[in-house]
Amino acid sequence: MNRGRVSIIGLGKLGLSMAVAFAKRGFSVNGMDVNPDTVRKVQQGISPVDETDVQALLAKHGDRIRATETVADAVRGTNLTCIVVATPSGPDGSFSNAQLLPAAEQVGLALREKRGYHVVAITCTVMPGTTDEVVRPLLERASGKKCGRDFGLVYNPEFIALGSVVRDFLNPDFVLVGESDPKAGRVMERLYGRLCENSPQVARMKCVEAEIAKIALNCFCTMKISYANMLAEVAEKVPGADARVITDAIGLDRRIGRRYLAPGLGFGGPCFPRDNVAFRAFAKRKGVSVPIPEAVHETNRRQVRRVLETVKHLLPKGGRVAILGLPYKPHTSVLTESQALEIAHGLSRCKTFSVAVYDPMALDNARKLLGRRVAYADSALECLQGAELCIIATPWPEFARLTARQLQEQMKRPCVLDCWRCLNPREATRVDYHAVGLGNVL
Ligand SMILES: NC(=O)c1ccc[n+]([C@@H]2O[C@H](COP(=O)([O-])OP(=O)(O)OC[C@H]3O[C@@H](n4cnc5c(N)ncnc54)[C@H](O)[C@@H]3O)[C@@H](O)[C@H]2O)c1
């Protein structure tokens, strides 16, 4: 099956995952990146990013993916170009266009040489207004062509989670398309019809509406997480109460839903925290005060402080702490804004604690950030050796398989602080067990 050729500018965590997903679904892909090392690796069939299924799909469908360092080379021979470069947050929380602008200009120059209709899709997260007010005039200037007539422009962000990017990209709950004109929107709607493994609804709107929708959606998810963590803090003050039981129940109401409604550590990663702050920055720019994202942010920050206080309460004289898990979620090695990592940082700064860490994927990244202040273990059991407290900080499936016997055998004192209700409840009853959201403990 040959479903056409698309070009992708930026072969990072999202861009390369999209490239292999397109290839899996029968599309040919021209991938472009400014990093020569990334391009060389992709050409050799080696994934430069650590993301589920990407390496396997690159090996299987690499013949459908061409990697280049030149935008014109990538755009030529395709009718759709997705720009997926990074848009890091600035000091006020707004997203920077420093990578997007040169990429868009190069795409515009490539369009000058190209015949036929072309759609440019901005996939990266941008501040509302960017596609119409910044990218559109830039593309028109560089290409000498008219948006809406010679080429279409869409804002088409993806709602994916690291660790399941390919699966999420091919099976979205819905597709969000902000369009310069109906023709561009129709092209995207048809594309997703052929690309997706499910049949998602496509929500089409103006670019600025889609730009607001993208960060508003993530803000809503963070609100659910902080709501659950607020309940956790309250339940902890009530002997015998369990916030998990409460969130599981209220999540059954379809007006609420269960996803993201569970006590745990706060949200982290490269999207949620910054989209929340960006929404606040955007509203402020428009002269609107938005207390909800502010409260969500503050509740989120409080989770780390609460866990650190609990550790000090459980080990008032200090001692050895084993931290199991470092990324903000399992199945990724990304440590951006990870509260598990912050806990490791916080404890390692206290002279009374010695900290050992273990993670199945993120130890190499952790070494760069935590240095020699902590000990690194090659397995969970090694990490537990001699510890007086075990903190389960990322809910990897392998930690759910730990037994009370293993904890008793390895640890000096089998005491667990389970941030995610990961441990099997039967095993939990056989050790000194504490958990976020469990009454009368923290
Ligand atoms: N990673 C995620 O979970 C996720 C989820 C949703 C949205 N996003 C958004 O997608 C965008 C990309 O995120 P990412 O995680 O893939 O970033 P990333 O940093 O992993 O990748 C960005 C890539 O773009 C390349 N690049 C930079 N300037 C370029 C240019 N001028 N031309 C071509 N390539 C260039 C970089 O070399 C890098 O390989 C961001 O806006 C991000 O907010 C990411």
Image: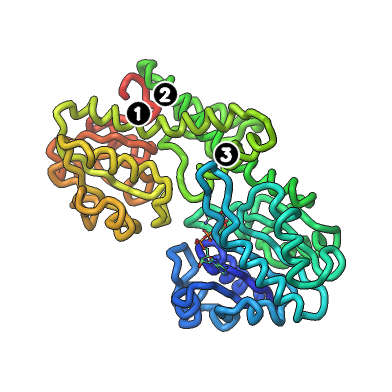
- In space, the residues marked 3 and 1 are separated at their CA atoms by 21 Å
Looking at the picture, tell me which residue is in the foreground, 392 or 356. 356
Ligand 1 within 8 Å of the CB at mark 1: no
Q: Amino acid at mark 1?
A: Arg
Total number of numbered labels? 3
- Measured as percent of width and height from the top left, residue 226 is found at 50, 32
- Rendering quarter of residue 406: top left
- Measured as percent of width and height from the top left, residue 281 is found at 60, 39
Looking at the rendered image, the quarter that the N terminus falls into is bottom right
Q: How is the image coloured?
A: rainbow
Q: Earlier in the sequence, mark 3 or mark 2?
A: 3
15 lies above or below 134: below
- Rendering quarter of residue 294: top right
Ligand 1 within 8 Å of the CB at mark 2: no
Q: Which residue is mark 3?
A: 221
Residue ranking furthest to the top: 238
Q: Earlier in the sequence, mark 3 or mark 1?
A: 3
Element assignment for label 1: helix
Q: Residues within 10 Å of mark 1 (few under 14, many from 20)?
A: some
Image point (57%, 59%), residue name: 98
Looking at the rendered image, the quarter that the C terminus falls into is top left
- Measured as percent of width and height from the top left, residue 421 is found at 38, 36
Q: Which circle marks residue 247 in the picture? A: none
Q: Amino acid at mark 2?
A: Glu
Q: Which circle marks residue 233 in the picture? A: 2
- In space, the residues marked 3 and 2 are separated at their CA atoms by 19 Å
- In space, the residues marked 1 and 2 are separated at their CA atoms by 9 Å
Q: Where in the image, quadrant-wise, is ligand 1 located?
A: bottom right
234 lies above or below 69: above
